[in-house]
């Protein structure tokens, strides 16, 4: 017997996510941990080990290129987003320039316009596609998934891969030599 969960963002879930995220952010013990922290839909803490160096350098390069190619927008790394399955942190997020006020919040209630997930050895493609679906439900316009070789897949809806970004069409989708 298989079980399929369909999660839908609700005001109640958003309220739980924001309350719990404030608690997580205020916890001095959690602040000292080197782990990446997210939550699930019940508010339980989900920790993963810090990413390896290649992940961090890819994250920095993506953030730099987005800021260079889309200077009117806001780029954030480890960007917390309230989703139907708790608070998730996209590796890199780009928000349109008219969204400056949202960056003062402890956690975004509407996903960045572009959410970028960088695959790590501990990730599966299925996990990242599930996160992508959560980001789309939370308002993302595009989700980019970067594989361990640096190639980028761009989606403008769950399960709808497109050839190039419509928001940042000049972004290189293959690793540079």
Image (cartoon, rainbow, N blue to C red):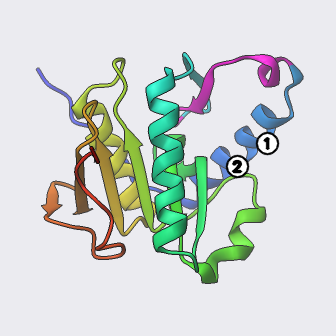
Residue under label 1, please give it. 22
Q: Quadrant of residue 75?
A: bottom right
Q: Can residue 44 be seen in this view?
A: no
Instruction: Check the image and report above or below for 101 versus 65.
Output: below
Residue under label 2, please give it. 18
Q: Percent position (x, y) of residue 88? A: 52, 41
Membership of 136 in magenta stretch: no
Q: Which residue is drawn at 52% across and 33% down?
A: 56
Q: Percent position (x, y) of residue 33? A: 74, 17
Closer to the camera in the image, 153 or 137: 153
At label 2, counting other C-alpha atoms closer than 10 Å, the crowd grade (few under 14, some 14-19, many 20 or more) is many
Q: Give the range drawn in magenta.
A: 29-41
Q: Percent position (x, y) of residue 86? A: 54, 41
State the separation of the CA atoms marked 2 and 1: 6 Å
Instruction: Check the image and report above or below for 160 versus 133.
Output: below
Q: Percent position (x, y) of residue 62? A: 45, 51
Closer to the camera in the image, 8 or 145: 145
Membership of 36 in magenta stretch: yes
**Does the residue at mark 2 contact the one at mark 1 (Cβ under 8 Å)?**
yes
In the image, 170: left or right of 64? left
Picture quarter with the N terminus:
top left
Closer to the camera in the image, 48 or 91: 91
Instruction: Check the image and report above or below for 177 versus 53.
Output: below
Q: Judging from the image, what secondary structure is the residue with disc 1 in?
A: helix
Q: In which quarter of the image is residue 78?
A: top right
Q: Is residue 118 visible?
A: yes
In the image, 124: left or right of 47? left
Question: Which residue is at the far front?
Answer: 177
In the image, 167: left or right of 49? left
């Amino acid at each position: 017997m298989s079980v399929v969960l369909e999660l839908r963002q609700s005001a109640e879930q958003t309220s739980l996510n924001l309350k719990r995220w404030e608690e997580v952010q205020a916890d001095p013990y959690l602040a000292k941990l080197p782990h990446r922290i997210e939550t699930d839909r019940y508010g339980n803490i989900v920790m993963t080990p810090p990413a390896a160096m290649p992940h961090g350098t890819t994250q920095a390069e993506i953030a730099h290129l987005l800021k260079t190619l889309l200077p009117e927008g806001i780029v954030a790394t480890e960007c917390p987003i309230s989703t139907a399955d708790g608070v998730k942190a996209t590796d890199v997020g780009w928000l349109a320039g008219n969204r400056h006020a949202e960056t003062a919040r402890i956690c975004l209630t509407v996903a960045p316009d572009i959410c970028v997930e960088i695959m790590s050895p501990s990730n599966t493609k299925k996990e990242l596609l599930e996160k992508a679906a959560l980001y789309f439900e939370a308002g993302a316009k595009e989700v980019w998934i970067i594989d361990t070789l640096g190639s980028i897949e761009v989606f403008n809806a769950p399960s709808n891969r497109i050839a190039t970004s419509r928001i940042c069409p000049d972004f290189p989708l293959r690793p540079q030599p």
